[in-house]
């Protein structure tokens, strides 16, 4: 299995830090965000990793190189301007191959996520060994998380591992997913396209699976969030308990 890490965003809300440093290279607890992902992927035996980039992308390539220092083989998909998530995947398809791949946003912090679990979530056959018809098998598998304060209404419903766009209660998409490449057949390389509407279209056809991840998960959107994660342990504990 191959992996893709999304690293093309501008990180507007993280300015002024992202004026000079691409967001995935910002450090959390002593290590760049994107390196956390690379090491966790390699630990699970997923060593072929595609990284797309646009804003300050040369810095990403200079910092990570070919990935040998991490035990990985890194490939880069360069975008003149960020193409959104689905557009980034479509543009990188020649690097991703024809098998399902896992994709994760470069600006989330998930230090304990075990990527071993992503390898067998998409099935081509039922429990009796019969092939699923193409229009009945899941095209992607999403990892959802409890709704954070900044996104209380969530994104998707979940019933018996089946993701829906209209179910309740709703969970937040954790920006980790496994996708079949053919899901992106309708998007041309270089085209701007968002992933959300595409997932919802397949969810309406009952072709999206998923589960809830309950481990540590942070979507870093502001400098304040970054500072909180990098605070000394005692300070973080006091903040979690509401101590001023």
Image (cartoon, grey):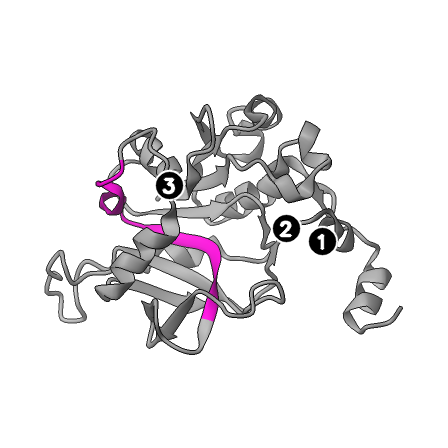
Q: Name the residue under label 1.
A: 225
Residue 122 at least partly seen: no
Residue 55: x and y in percent read 56, 28
- What kind of element bears circle 3? loop
The CA distance from mark 2 to mark 1 is 6 Å
Query: Which quarter of the rendered picture does the C terminus lie within?
Result: bottom right
- What kind of element bears circle 2? loop
Would you place residue 205 above or below residue 219 in this image?
Answer: below
- What kind of element bears circle 1? helix
Q: Residue furthest right?
A: 244
From the viewer's side, name the closer residue of 41 and 221: 221
> Quadrant of the rendered structure where residue 79 is?
top left
Q: Residue at x 47, y 69 (%)?
A: 171
Q: Earlier in the sequence, mark 3 or mark 2?
A: 3
Dot 1 alpha-carbon crowd within 10 angstroms: few under 14, some 14 to 19, many 20 or more: some
Would you place residue 131 above or below residue 146 in this image?
Answer: above
Q: Residue at x 54, y 48 (%)?
A: 40
């Amino acid at each position: 299995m191959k992996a893709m890490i999304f690293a093309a965003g501008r990180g507007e809300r993280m300015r002024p830090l992202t004026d000079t440093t691409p967001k995935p290279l910002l450090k959390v607890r002593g290590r760049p965000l994107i390196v956390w992902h690379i090491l966790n992927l390699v630990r699970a035996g997923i060593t072929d990793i595609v990284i797309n980039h646009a804003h300050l992308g040369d810095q990403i390539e200079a910092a990570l190189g070919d990935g040998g220092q991490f035990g990985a083989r890194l490939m880069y998909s360069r975008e003149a301007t960020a193409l959104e998530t689905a557009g980034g995947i479509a543009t990188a398809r020649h690097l991703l191959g024809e098998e399902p791949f896992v994709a994760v946003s470069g600006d989330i912090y998930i230090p304990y996520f075990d990527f071993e679990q992503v390898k067998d979530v998409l099935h081509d056959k039922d429990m009796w060994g019969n092939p699923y018809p193409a229009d009945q098998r899941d095209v992607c598998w999403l990892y959802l998380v409890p709704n954070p304060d900044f996104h209380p209404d969530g994104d998707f419903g979940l019933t018996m591992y089946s993701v829906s766009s209209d179910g309740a209660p709703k969970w937040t998409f954790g920006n980790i997913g496994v996708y079949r490449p053919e899901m992106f057949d309708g998007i041309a390389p270089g085209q701007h396209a968002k992933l959300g509407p595409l997932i919802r279209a397949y969810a309406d056809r009952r072709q999206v699976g998923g589960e809830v991840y309950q481990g540590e998960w942070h979507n870093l959107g502001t400098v304040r969030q970054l500072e909180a994660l990098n605070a000394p342990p005692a300070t973080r504990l006091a903040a979690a308990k509401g101590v001023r």
